[in-house]
Image (tube, coloured by chain):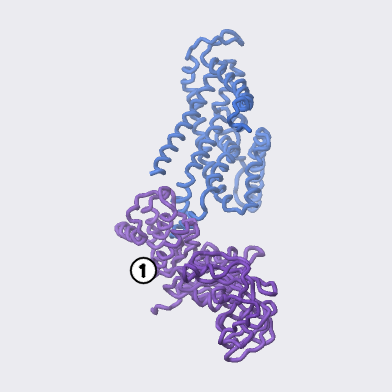
Amino acid sequence: MQDWREDKTFFRATIALPVIWFLIFFVVPMAMVWAYSVGENVGPVDVEITGTFANYAKAFTPEVLKVMGDSIVLAFVTTLICLVVAFPVALAMTFADEKQKAWLLLLIMLPFWTNLLIRTYALIAVMRSSGVINTGLEGLHGLLAFAGLQMGTFEPLPLLYNKFAVVVGLVYVHLPFMVLPLYAALDRLDKSLIEASLDLGAGHLETIRRVIVPLAAPGIAAGLVITFIPALGAYLTPDLLGGPDDLMIASLIERQFKRANDWPFGAALSFILMYITLLFFAIRAFMERKGGKVGAH
Amino acid sequence: MSDRDTIIRVEEVTKRYGKVTAVDRVTLEIPRGEFFALLGPSGCGKTTLLRMLAGFEMPSEGKIFIDGVDMSTIPPNKRPVNMVFQSYAVFPHMTVFENVAYGLKFDNVAKADQYGRVMAALADVKLDHLAERKPDQMSGGQRQRVALARALVKKPKVLLLDEPLSALDAKLREAMRFELAELQDKVGITFVMVTHDQDEALAMAGRCAVMDRGKLMQTATPSNLYEFPANKFVADFIGSVNLFEGTLEVDEPDHAIVQSEELGGRIFFDHGVSGAGGEKMWVGIRPEKIELLKREEGSTPPTPEDAPSGCNVTAGIVRQISYLGSESIYEIDLINGRRMQVSRPNLSRWDQEDFTWDDEVWLRWHGDSPVLLQS
């Protein structure tokens, strides 16, 4: 019998479908968007590909740069908060017994199975001025006033439609992206290394700093990139939770394609977002190689 | 401070995981400077006991004292013990030197002294020339030496070793046995080793504790474990043994006789056994303590000179032979169908040809060879 791996026809037959899929739904549309990005509007719906870089130049105006800067800062803050929150969660999960692990993983994955829109509106319900948090605080306020404390009138906390709300939303949505790679990295760690560190006199924090974090570094790097990239391109969350000043780059792109009807500029912005993303991938690859070299010698 | 004072005292220690009792009321004392082995089949609780000494597990009941100090509330990083892990647990992101220096950081050892102590510890395990290597460039045996140096550099009161030789290949294992014993002699630190390999324990340890299903079966020197096992489990676990059920018929200060249906005869002891007569007991006879003689049709049984006639001799047929070079193991079927094992050293180059398959033989042993076991 012939080895199927050496059977060229079989190989071609199986690879053909994914290749065609990839061409039609990724390469061709991307090429079209790229073509638009060097085009000009010549009518309400017509775009002529002229090879101009004016659309890219338009991105370097203060307003657009502010949105891009804000997006990077918001995504960065989100990523850091995710790391700080997810690390203990992932570490705790690795120490749970096998049965609990499956349940905990399920809990982490559960939000993925719920529509993002529904989750975001749920968050709004929690955070709006007559939402769960503010109503609760108001009740507490009333209680304290009843107890005779001079409290003044209750002002609901401005939890929504600002950068705070955007970060909360982004952290909430992207937390699993951080927990899962961290968990994968920490779970692979030989537990006896942690015990050895304790045995040799290190406390728990010293052990985390000197043993767990260095050995989980690839997982941490993966988590940072995997969280940062979707957070940077987030559309729905900042759009619904942010105020008019808290525009992120995806919303700006959406406006070009819809309200502004400026497809070439929208296309150029899309590609700038992609270049930023690729830049972070490159930084990660570079750091990994550097880390690898250190590890090998 | 006398040489024989107690460094570890385990008092009525029990460890339960839910409904499973891993360690069951173990009481144990280990003198300072001893090479002690915890021996038993997998799942007997020996590793749990070791991990309780290290502080990774806490006893459900009972107390552990190390150098007279109750360890009940002392976490692993504050205990005067260090461990060599089964997987060695050498930190892969540190060089050999950094691995060994790691534990000194927490001991308030001056930076200037660290270098000397690390290099001395590495010299003790003959690794001083590889200080700058990374663990992934080393063999399993070398990594184990790193783990040893890393633990010993802290000058612990007790060194714990979890199955130290199990991951090494046969030749290296043999060499490491002697080396570990020599190292222990040199540094004078109490070693507590966990192993499932009886050869390892007998070869290296000054004293062994045999455990089974969480219970301590016997604590004794290797030769006492082998020659004077406390019960059936120890007799069977340490080396090979032929076990026969029987009842004690005669029990005098200078001799005893056990009647055994299983053997199809009587077993004579040339010493008193101080057991209760008439009760069910077991007799264990080691394969090498049985003599093999040719049996011809109609010949009389050659009863050993110290035993009354008809004792300590039985007839059989050779069924299986394992030639092991230095000795041969014979599986022999007795007349009543019961199988017995006899080993015979190959003292000359032709000895293994003395007996062959289906040979009719006499099995014979002296009155001091069998051991009476009450449980």
Q: Indicate the chain on which mark 1 is placed.
A: B
Q: Nearer the viewer, residue A262 or B49?
A: B49
Seen at 55% across and 83% down, the residue is B368
Q: Position of residue A66 (x, y in %)?
A: 49, 26
Seen at 53% across and 48% down, the residue is A188
Residue at image mark 1: B186
Compared with A147, B23 (above or below) is below
* Crowd rating for badge 1 (residues with CA inside 10 Å; few <14, some 14–19, many 20+): few
Q: Nearer the viewer, residue B158 or B78?
A: B158
Q: Position of residue A34 (x, y in %)?
A: 53, 18
Dot 1 amino acid type:
Lys
A121 horizontally vs A36: left or right: right
Instruction: Check the image and name the residue furthest to the front.
Output: B297
Chain A drawn colour:
blue
Compared with A282, B243 (above or below) is below
Pick the quarter of the image with the C terminus of chain A: top left
Q: Nearer the viewer, residue B334 or A53?
A: B334
Pick the quarter of the image with the N terminus of chain A: top right
Seen at 52% across and 42% down, the residue is A83
Q: Position of residue B138 (x, y in %)?
A: 41, 50
Residue B61 in sight: no
SS of the residue at dot 1? helix
Seen at 59% across and 82% down, the residue is B302
Q: Position of residue A187 (x, y in %)?
A: 55, 48
Q: Which chain's colour is purple?
A: B
Q: Quadrant of residue A249?
A: top right
Compared with B83, A20 (above or below) is above
Compared with A245, B198 (above or below) is below
B273 horizontally vs B172: left or right: right
